[in-house]
Image: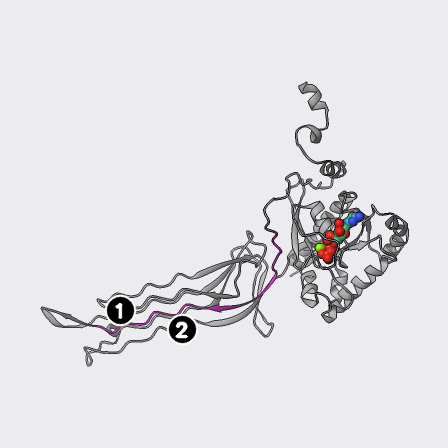
Amino acid sequence: MNFFKRCLPFSCTVLKITEKQCNAWRTMSIVVPDIPKPIPVRKSKSMSNKVKPIVDFRSIKVHGGKGGDGCISLRRLCKNPLGGPDGGDGGNGGHVTFKATSNKTSLDHISSVIKAEDGEKGMNRDCHGRNAEHLVVEVPVGTMFRSTGGEVLADLNEDGAIFIAARGGAGGKGNQYFTTDVNQAPEIAEYGATGEELTYTVEIRTIAHVGLIGLPNAGKSTFLRAISRARPMVAPYPFTTLQPHVGVVKYDDLQHVTVADIPGLIAGAHRNRGLGIAFLRHIERCLCLLYVVDASLPEPWQQLDVLQYELGQYDQRLLERPSGILANKMDLAPSRKNLAELERYATDINLPLFPVSAKDSVGVLPILHYVRKLYDGSHAEGGSNEKAE
Ligand SMILES: Nc1nc2c(ncn2[C@@H]2O[C@H](COP(=O)(O)OP(=O)(O)OP(=O)(O)O)[C@@H](O)[C@H]2O)c(=O)[nH]1
Ligand SMILES: [Mg+2]
């Protein structure tokens, strides 16, 4: 019995998975020599309701902690009624610092107002107030801090890099500090200094290696669900996705490639129509682009025209990023009719075209190989640029 079990396809016996997952796996496990192969998603999607979009831009206000006030006190004991000044100094306020870490990928945990602790007040009997702990906020590697004028003030591009965003105020001196030969009982002390209050815009330079771009309803979220464990909402109406979602594709050489589902673009997006410029900004933060086209619509190549026009109007350099085209919804009859014309169009603009049915997970494997090629290419370029610098 065991022998027969071993002869049967592994997926049908050991793992209890659905027929759809089984098909996806079969398509994925085609042997391609010398290329890292994507590892199919075996774990089912989480049942909890938390669907976390990625936050790549935030406006924040940071307040350094206030220094503690110095104390005015004159020691009076029963046997020593003129004991002298004994007011302690206040403690220093904490700084607000940001630390780059590879454990974070999003800015969603950062609140819009961040305040560090205040220093403690000084007390009598020469007790100094406690210095406040510095507040350390973790951010993803590649986070940039800009002033309100748009100037880049810090770029945390290394794991462990730290930026002090607001310094805490120094603690005030107590009256004991002001004792002199002339004035043996000063009744003055300092207030603690207030901490810095500054405003920054924080943004992540790269949200994902590959960005999925398309008109609303093209099937970007469905495709991301097919290749990763991400769970962006899928529905047959436009603008279902309002925030980018990032999924991870794993390869058998242990490399992880992140793919972002960007909210749908429409004609006029560069003039702030639809979800507007804020969403074109997400695209800027992807190293490579995949245009997702609904091939079942009449003249689907027009979707490519619109997408490329909008990207070009926003930033011409986006068109030079390594790209590819996904002709989605190939399970529908009109798509098959449009495919030949779409292929011709793709050849004209010199981009590879991949027919796919995201809903049925058919045709996914060649895309994942191409995604890996784009990723390797962008990293090789990055490496050579660094060397050149
Ligand atoms: N037949 C078929 N339908 C698909 C396919 N992919 C997506 N759909 C359907 O297309 C509709 C839109 O899919 P989404 O994945 O939400 O599209 P989207 O591009 O993320 O849309 P927005 O988030 O609004 O920009 C849904 O009803 C999907 O079921 C496919 O390959 N075949
Ligand atoms: Mg979507």
User: Residue tagged by mark 1?
Assistant: 88
Q: Main secondary structure of the magenta part?
A: loop
Percent position (x, y) of residue 125?
21, 66
Q: Earlier in the sequence, mark 2 or mark 1?
A: 1
Cα gap from disc 2 to disc 1, whole angstroms: 18 Å
Dot 1, crowdedness within 10 Å: few (<14), some or many (≥20)?
many
Which picture quadrant has residue 191?
A: bottom left
Q: Does residue 377 show up?
A: no
Q: Is residue 66 magenta?
A: yes
Quadrant occupied by the C terminus: bottom right
Percent position (x, y) of residue 201?
57, 68
User: Residue tagged by mark 2?
Assistant: 194
Dot 2, crowdedness within 10 Å: few (<14), some or many (≥20)?
many
Which stretch is magenta?
51-73
Question: Which three-letter amino acid code belongs to the residue tagged 2?
Answer: Thr
- Secondary element at image label 1: loop
Residue 301 placement, left or right of 79: right
Quadrant occupied by the N terminus: top right
Percent position (x, y) of residue 82?
13, 74
Comparing 156 with 128, the one in front is 128
For the point 18% across and 77% down, the residue is 184
Tell me: residue 13, above or below residue 275. above
Question: Which three-letter amino acid code belongs to the residue tagged 1?
Answer: Gly
For the point 67% across and 20% down, the residue is 2
Q: Residue furthest top?
A: 1
